[in-house]
Amino acid sequence: MPRRFHDAEELLPPATAFKRALAIIYDGLISIAVLLVATWIYTIIAGWITGWDQYEQMAEAGQLSGDPGLTFTLFLVLYLFFGYFWTRIGQTLGMQVWRIRIENLDGTPVSWSQALRRYVTAAAVIFLTLLASHYLGEATLFVTVPALIALFFPINGLSVTDRLSDSVVVAVPKALNTP
């Protein structure tokens, strides 16, 4: 029998857009710190494997710009970070502060595949939004704002990431906010 956050019959209300936004900002700041540490570790390992003198020459020549290995590593590290919290306790650190949680409709934690769908959907929309902003210039607002609203904020209680990962983001009462 899978672990449940609450009884299957109990339905928690959907999280508000305001709480989602605050949790996203909070988790975004934490993500920056995680990415800085991951980049530091990647650089140490890459410099050690390549040789520090050669690695320094490559950096000075601009050959390390857009390093696909670093890009993949950072993408993977963030997925593991978010996936760990989503699958274990349903809440990232920012979500804990604002008392919201990702769960299945029956109150069970999401699976790693659901976390992957949620993460890839968010990453794809953010990437396409940044790409559009690069090519559209001032018309970006007409693309960026609706894309981010559809991605993260609920329409009829479910956002795009909720729908594609078959999960919901709910408001957690104070008594239930313990992992």
Image: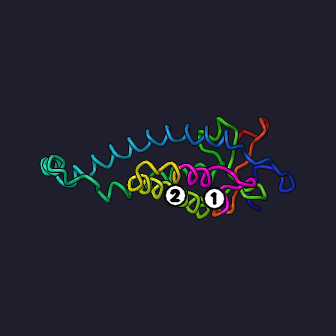
Left or right relative to 140: residue 7: right
The image's mark for residue 125 is: 2
Residues marked 2 and 1 touching at CB (< 8 Å): yes
Q: How far is disc 2 from disc 1 in space, using C-alphas? A: 10 Å
Dot 2 alpha-carbon crowd within 10 angstroms: few under 14, some 14 to 19, many 20 or more: some
Q: Residue at x 70, y 38 (%)?
A: 99
Magenta residues, start to end: 145-163
Q: As rendered, which of 163 and 12 lies closer to the eye? A: 163
Question: In the rendered picture of this protein, how many numbered marks are placed on residues?
Answer: 2
Q: Residues within 10 Å of mark 1 (few under 14, many from 20)?
A: many
Earlier in the chain: of badge 2 and badge 1, it is 2
Q: Quadrant of the C terminus?
A: top right
Picture coordinates of residue 84, whole percent (x, y): 56, 51
Identify residue for label 1. Answer: 160
Residue type highlighted by circle 1: Val
Residue 95 highlighted magenta (yes or no): no
Q: Is residue 46 left or right of residue 81?
A: left
Q: Is residue 166 left or right of residue 29?
A: right
Q: Residue furthest right?
A: 9
Image coordinates for residue 141, horizontal then vertical, percent: 51, 48
Q: Secondary structure at mark 1?
A: helix
Q: Is residue 58 left or right of residue 159?
A: left
For residue 116, above or below residue 21? below
Residue 2 picture location, percent across and down: 74, 60
